[in-house]
Image: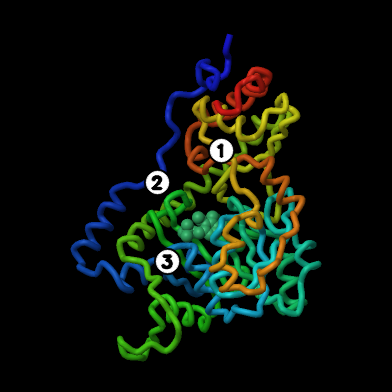
Amino acid sequence: MKHLALGGGTPVRVDPFPNWPVYGKEEEEALSRVLRSGQWGTLGPEASAFEKEFAEYLGTSGALCVANGTVSLETALRALDIGPGDEVIIPAYTFIATLTSVLITGALPVFSDIDPKTNTLDPEGVRQIITHRTKAVILVHMAGIPADMDAFAAIASKHGILIIEDAAQAHGSEWKRKKAGTLGSCGSFSFQATKNMSAGEGGAIVSARRDLLEQCWSIHHTGRSREGAWYEHVRLGTNYRITDWQAAVLRCQLSRLDEQIRTREGNAEKLIYLLKDIEGIDPLVPDHRVTRNTWHLFMFRYDAAAFSGVPKGRFVRALEAEGIPAFSGYTPLYSQAMLGHSSVLRAVPDLAGKSFRKLPATEKACRETVWFPQYLLLGTDKGIEDIASAVEKIQRHSGELAAVEDSV
Ligand SMILES: Cc1ncc(COP(=O)(O)O)c(C=O)c1O
């Protein structure tokens, strides 16, 4: 008899998980407000109100909205005057934007390994590869878990390098009660469709450095200056502006953020408890210095040996068949074919002939880490119990799964 849903059995869950994005009357009213205002685009009142509210929420002095979380990184790097001849240390376990933003400036990305306990950059590895050309480190607060900000603050001050926080997945996360994105020279956020605050697309740069945000403002606004004429462009910029539609929605999303984080934190705790006795499943739980985790993703290690040798991809498909959305996550960025393309090599000649060494913790994380998306943690106790039951069921019948063809 087939037990697993992937093999034709009955799924653990047929009810849907909560919808994402969450929206209400507030968003409808906000969008009507923008419609009636006639100020739909460039630097409107909703964008400036959201910038103020977001900066206040994070406990920093300034924010600038941009089109998305990819160009926010690029804008920040360019404003920090990072370019050809500079090296920027980044993790290889992250979204492609962390890499492409560096490449677009002409600087050389240098990959460093991650801490297997959090899948964020390992400070020790970074220390070992700093050279006189190292200008910055981009820390990715993976899944909402801030990187080790104490260690990186010490590295930054000792070596005089900049810390850029890629907080695309960490709206509201905290390191020792300080918000992610406010601990380095600047922080970069994404409001893309799956993120914990969403306007479909959107991004923001936050910083306590006014001069830096002014540079970013100019770059994202076609190189204009505040005092200059409309058709006067004082530096190389481009159009990376957000619209007021997006900003108006983000103001509503921000008002729900804390409550949603509290719900996710409570549900994550329950899920950790329910998964803890399942052999081969090991949730990634940050230490006590992370005083708040937004749980953009619930990451756990999957040990195929405890599941009759079933590869991770098939385990993820089995979870989905049981009615539990899950993802296999990233592959190492240094393996991306784009790194060898001629346009990239022309933009970053330092890359020519460079073969990136494999980073063991990154390789292992890509092999073993599974993600549950954040909206699963916005549901009820029953949803959390179903997730754990599905994992436990798959393990109990992993022999059956091992016999399934890989194409299934
Ligand atoms: C870690 C990280 N950095 C950057 C980005 C880029 O953000 P966006 O999709 O808004 O361009 C994302 C999100 O997709 C991300 O997860």
Which residue is at 38% across, 58% downward? 250
Q: Measuring from the top left, give residue 392's x and y in whole percent.
A: 64, 24
Q: Quadrant of the N terminus?
A: top right
Q: Measuring from the top left, give residue 212's x and y in whole percent.
A: 53, 80
Which residue is at 47% across, 77% downward? 216
Query: If you read the primary sequence from the N terminus, does the residue marked by circle 1 or circle 3 appear first?
Result: 3
User: Helix or strand or loop: what does disc 2 sit on?
Assistant: loop
Q: Measuring from the top left, give residue 301's x and y in whole percent.
A: 69, 39
The disc placed on residue 53 is 3
User: Helix or strand or loop: what does disc 1 sit on?
Assistant: helix
Q: Which residue is mark 1?
A: 267
- Say what amino acid the circle numbered 3 marks: Glu
Q: Which residue is mark 2?
A: 21
Q: Is mark 3 within 8 Å of ligand 1?
A: no
Q: Is residue 402 left or right of residue 324?
A: right
Q: In whole angstroms, how far apart are the C-alphas of marks 2 and 3?
A: 20 Å
